[in-house]
Amino acid sequence: NTSHQKHHSPSLSLSSTPHTRTHTHTMSQQIPIQFSELFQLTSLPGISPNTITFSTVSMQSDKFICIRDVINEAKVINIVEVETQKLTTNKVNAESAIMNPSTKVLALRAGNTLQIYNLEMKTKMKQYTMNEPILYWCWVNASTLAIVTKGSVYHWSMEGNEDPKKVFDKHTNFEGATIINYRVDKSEKWLLLIGLKRTDTGFMQGVMQLYSVEKGATQAIEGHAAAFMEYRLSPTYTTTLICIAANTQQGGKLFVMEVPGPKPADAPKMQRRVTQIPFPVNTDFPVAMQVSEKHGIIYLITKTGFLFLYEASTATLIYKNRISAETIFVTAPYGATNGLIGINKSGQVLSVSIDDSTIIPFLTESNAQLAIQIASYANLGGADDLYIRQFNQFVQQGDVQNAVKVAATSPQGILRTQETIQKLRRISIQPGQKNPLSVYFQTIIETGKLNTFESVELAQIVLQKPQGVNYIEKLMNEDKIEGSETLGDIIQPYNPDLALKIYLKGQAHDKIIDNLLRVGDFERVLAYCDKVNYDPDYLYLFRKLVQINRDAAVKFAARVYETKPGFIDPNTIVDIFVQGQMIKQATAFLLEILKEDKEEDAELQTRLLDINLMYSPVQVADSILGQNMFSHYNKQHVAQLCEKVGLYQRALENYSSLADRKRVIVNTQYLNAEWLVNFFGNNLSQEETLICLRELLQNNIRQNLNLVVEVAHKYSNELGPNELIRMFEDFHSFDGIFYYLSGVVDELQDADLVFKYIESAVKIGQLPEVERITRENDVYDSVKVKEFLKSSGLKNQTPLINVCDKHGFVEELVHYLYSNKLNQYIDSYIKTRNPLKTPNVIGALLDVDASEDYITGLLMSVGNMCPIEPLVAEVEKRNRLKLLRPWLEARVNEGTEEPAAHNAIAKIYIDTNNNPDQFLRENQYYDSRVVGKYCEKRDPHLSFIAYERGQCDEEIVHVTTANSMFKQLARYLVRRQNDNLWRLVLDEENEHRRQIIDQVVQTALPECQDADEVSSTVRAFMAADLPNELIELLEQIVLHGNSNFKTNKSLQNLLILTAIKADPDRVKGYLEKLDQYDGPDIAQIAIEKGLYEEAFYIYNKFDLHEDAIGVLIRNIGDIDRATDFADNIATPSVWSLLGNAQLNATPPLIAEAIESLMKANDSNTYRQVITAAEQGGYYTELIRYLLMARQQTQDSFIDTELIYSYAKCSEQDEGSNSLADLEDFISSPNTAQILAVGERCFDEGMYEASRILFSHINNYSRLASALIKLGRYREAVAAATKANSIKTWKEVMVACIEAKDFRYAQSCGLNIIIHADELDDLIFYYESRGYFDEVIALLEKGLGIEGAHKGIFTSLAILYAKYKSEKMMDHIQRYYRRCFIQKLLGACEQNELWAELCFLYRHSDEYDLAVRTMIDHPVEAWDHNTFTETIRQVVNMELHYRSIQFYLDEHPQHVIDLLQVLTPNLDHERVAREVEKTGDLPLIKEYLEVVQDNNLPAVNDALHKLYIEEEDYETLRNSIEQFRNFDQIVLAKKLEKHELLEFRRISAWMYRINKKYAESISLSKQDKLYQDAMDTAAESQDRDISEDLLRFFVENKLNACFAACLYNCYSFIRPDVALELAWRNNIQDMVMPFMIQVLREYTNKVDKLGEKQEAAAANANHNAFQPDEMQSEYSDPSVYYSAAGYPSEHMGPPPMGGGYYDQGGQGSGFINF
């Protein structure tokens, strides 16, 4: 609605629509709601607009929103937290999801299965599967789900293991309804189910079912939205209301009533309320209702987005507005604002609530009583004046009861003041009447609680009576009075315990603490202070506590310091403890507050250690430092103190300079060795550590060597082994080197350092360690160590043997030992140390030409411990293999299976020709490849034996082909049966392939008796793709070979298949000769290879007739031959195959196919037959076939097609009896889809057949369609009447219109126009064909029919506007209430019916547009009375100003009348400015004078302009004096040049009142208005201005004015100036009165100064020094400073008239000013 004003929220526009005159508001007024968009769902990541629907979005509370979606075919649940807009996505295969209203518990539904999940704990809580479909579900509270099925309503608690319990059965009214809501009252005794269903007329009807749990009774109600509300009828009684909203056929209604049930006898009752709901359109209806129990207000949301606010107890409409252009489909209470939260279809999450600051002012103007009621109910401000006025009125009338009631219930206690009590006290008490104050207090006590001053007033009254204190205590226990310090003081003399309670309640903290201090309970003091968050003088409390309990004082101070930062100074606390010699308490306090080791506590940490090092045993400080509690204290200071008291360890920990540490560290006898070792690593750098270690060695190497070695060992990596070795070498300490490296040598990776270790071990005689390190260490330089050991001349050669054995110097070792005649070490080495090195030793001995006997003896002594293979290699390398024969034979005799031994024996036997053939065949342990390779050059035959024994395929191929041994190779291949070997020899790249194939075919296979070998050979030939050779091979085997192979099925199959592949001409011969092959499989392969005749031969040979005819049909494609074959075979299966083939032939042989299928009695392919027959038009044959098929198969499709065939036969041959047969058939039992075939006949133009079919099934709507096609309109209307379908009526009507039979068309139209949705299409159809009079006649007749709706009246009015405008005004005046005015507005505007348009605007509350229309079209639409009546109610303020200009231009004689109407709503300044621009100010002078009381600048300026133009200076002066809100300086400047004196005088006066005294005086002097000038100078109180004016009078010889000016400006003129001017100008007489007065005043001042001087001297004699009394051994130094006369920061400035001490050294009193 473009005329509505906009109320803007941060993100959304709110269209504000006034609905009644009392609710109209201007732009400056505020509306009574707060409306905002919280956020937009579609702006969140992953939320699609398509998911914002009623079925996919759920919101059970103001905490969470659930949105179901499908992403990449996966179902997800998006959960949005409303407060933070945090989005969580969960992949859940569910159809519905709802979040618990208060916790992160998610309920899911998939089909009939329900599950409840705890999202925080990620666990499934409960699961249940319902027995019937679930139509609706929701949470009714934080622990219970409501489930609505087709027949019942269940409640399911998520606590415990209970299954859902049925609560009640659904009412029959819900049949066909969609459940949209379910409400439960607070007590869960009343349950309400809500649904929607569409009526036959298209109206959206609301259905409800109210159920009483206590009575088990149910009631059906018509309604769309409802809610329960807890409503406070009185301060002591709250009832439950049920609120129901509906839009029925009779209009919108709101029902509010109490739910039935027992209630107290004295409980107030509320009348049942029913009120109209002014829906903007008739089709609108409520979709949601929420309540504000705080305000007692109902929120009602409609489908079109309108918001209605109703007060609950009176059902009064407060406010109506459209808040959303889209439907708000889900709402929930919004606890943060006592309003509601909702979501509309565009995804906006909206918040609506009552604006507490504006609702009362909003209602005050229209309904003061309601404003008072809501203000009292919700305790809101804004109605203060109403309450005060009402209270004063009752007081004046003496109506005490009502006055008290108004005061007691006033919102926010505006009347519960001291002033009210005084007014009630002043009321005179009539005989028999209660004291007003008593009534006042009693009323408040009964309904609420007394406030502070009311409690004091009541106490002062009742304590004067006996038992008064008991009454106060009773009220206190009932929480009826407010505690305060004043009330406690009043009660204290009567009851101290009660007073303490009152102090507690009134938070009189100091009083409470004083009481607790009085009894010595300091613990409760601290607890109380913490509880009430009150901070007293904690230092004072601490001093008191120190005197009573020192340990408690420590806890108190520590707790205050920690919980109340800044309230006590820890240094002050420590000072108090130390001054009292409480070192232990000081330590405890500091330890407690310094637990967190903060940098800002460095000074306190230092002080703690300082105190304990100076005044406590050293163990205390040592313990504190040992716990590493602090790190920010002054370490240098503490270290010095520790060194002084002998805590060298703590001193080292805290010293940071190397010099200090070197001085302390030499005291190793006092230091823990383990700690000192750790100290080096944790506190010193590498350089510092080395310096300190040298210091220790330098100071006492014997004493400190072990410590230095331990440090060097532990921090070897950090300090560097080389540096440490160098340090020890500087002190010539091989012991140090050895013991240092002994700890780290196993970790060293530096060969030089390991050598140092070996060297130092040799030097100090640690040979066992030398032996160990050479054996175990892998880092040392083997060459360097070997040479060192050889040169050291050790008696024991074990270290050298270790080095040489480990690092491969065996040959060099043997040479060294053999040359030095140390053979015993050689024997020992290979026998006991490392027999595995025997081959190396034997090789070395052979190299030095040792004797064979010595070598053989060594070998035999070692025996089997010597490895064979390396020994053979070493000896064979030196061509001395025969030397080993005895040793090898000994090993063989021992049973060794090691191939190396047997290889060596074989080689020896081959070379010596010792029966090698037998050895090679019989020995199982030699390596065939090694021995075969050895024999290749010596004897290929022996090589073949060795290779064959080991199946060395490649080697055999090589040796046989190289030596032309193809026969041996062929036999080996057949026996071997290895596919890889066959591929190798049959490879086409093999030059010997032909020779090998020949030997296989001619020699190897004829000799073969093993079928597997034959099969393997054949498979190899096939794999090698040698079909011709394979055929040759197979013929040899199958046709001419072994009898066992002739009948072998596999070989026959293989032969035939190979022939199919390689030589198809041979196939037929093989098929005739062989009979053991697999016929069906071979036939299938033959078909695949295109050998169709061979396949047919096989199938026929094996009596597979169906397959045989299949080859004829599918592969050979000879239908005639297939027909002959079928005649010969004559089996149903063959006929069936033939029939299907004929059916699928190209072109299809339909008649023949049907004949064949009937011979086969086959109805299986009836659908295909039907399709083909219908395409070819063979309906006669098809009928025969379908009659046969119908006997075999019960299928509605057959019956349906049979009916269709009858119809088509009738169409092909009109003289046939097919339609009669059709009627007979449908009259008999059948399963045909008659409707479908009727539609088919209709679509194909067989209208008579379709008529018969539609008539048979009573489908009157389609019957009407058929009759229309047959041109039988009367019968068509009769059929439409029976069908009673809007679609049918439209169809018949269109046909009648096309036939121009308007009588029958009107009959149809009357049944159509009652459906509002169809009306526009009907009118368009008539209009598009030019039948204007006919459609108007139709609608005119429709006005009187039952069910006539607004659309009919509206559409008729639009037609009048278009075609018969003369009837328009009369129609809308009679029926505007039954029209959709919004539609008529456009029609009137389009057809320029301005008077009618204005009328409609006014009656649709569109006053703005009505006014615009009258302004824009005054000739046709304007009427003065109508205009002034309408302009009062417009919302757009701009129209007021446009209307004024309109009247000034068109109707100036009525402009004052208009302004009188508009005055309350006008911006008078704007009116004045705009009219001034047009020059029409005189026309509105009367209006301007009326509104001048508002004292507005523009109005004042306009009137001033008029007065100046009229030269009315008196009225101008009066106006200026009364209304000064304008730019006075501008007006003054404008008037100072005016030709009239009085206007210039006004200008001077205006300068004067604006303190422009110089300009005012100048203007007065110009006009010789000297009295005005003197008055101005006196008012200015400016000496210069006054004296300048005085000089002006003297200069102009105005002596009288000179004297008068001295009088008027007496206070501002200096006497010397006045006297000088008079003396110079010889007018001393004129100045003499002035001088006499001045002299008198100065004499009085001198006298007063003398008196003050005497008083000051007397006071100075009393300023003697008196020292203050010292207290507790401590006093403030400023006391002495101030006593001695020095200024102190505690002293204020010296008094005026006193003096500062003269510090110049005179010392003789004070210097007075």
Image (cartoon, helix red, strand yellow):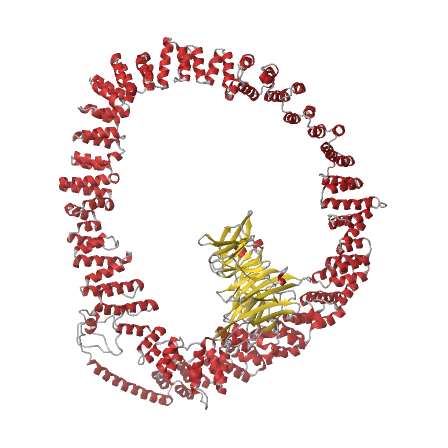
Q: Residue furthest bottom?
A: 431
In the image, residue 290 sits, relative to residue 863, either above or below, namely below
Task: Report the number of numbered marks.
Answer: 0
The answer to whether 756 appears left or right of 1265 in the picture is: left
**In the rendered image, which quarter is residue 13 located in?**
bottom right
**In the rendered image, which quarter is residue 796 located in?**
top left
Q: Position of residue 811 (x, y in %)?
A: 27, 19
Which of the pair 1028/1428 is nearer the observer?
A: 1028
In the image, residue 114 sits, relative to residue 1478, either above or below, namely above
The answer to whether 507 appears left or right of 684 in the picture is: right
In the image, residue 856 sits, relative to residue 709, either above or below, namely above
Q: Position of residue 926 (x, y in %)?
A: 39, 17
Which of the pair 975/485 is nearer the observer?
A: 975
Quarter of the figure with the N terminus: bottom right
Q: Position of residue 171 (x, y in %)?
A: 61, 63
**Residue 878 visible, this angle:** no
Q: Residue furthest top?
A: 913
**Residue 1007 visible, this angle:** yes
Image point (58%, 15%), residue name:
1042
Which of the pair 1372/1268 is nearer the observer?
A: 1268
Q: Position of residue 998 (x, y in %)?
A: 56, 13
Which of the pair 1244/741 is nearer the observer?
A: 1244
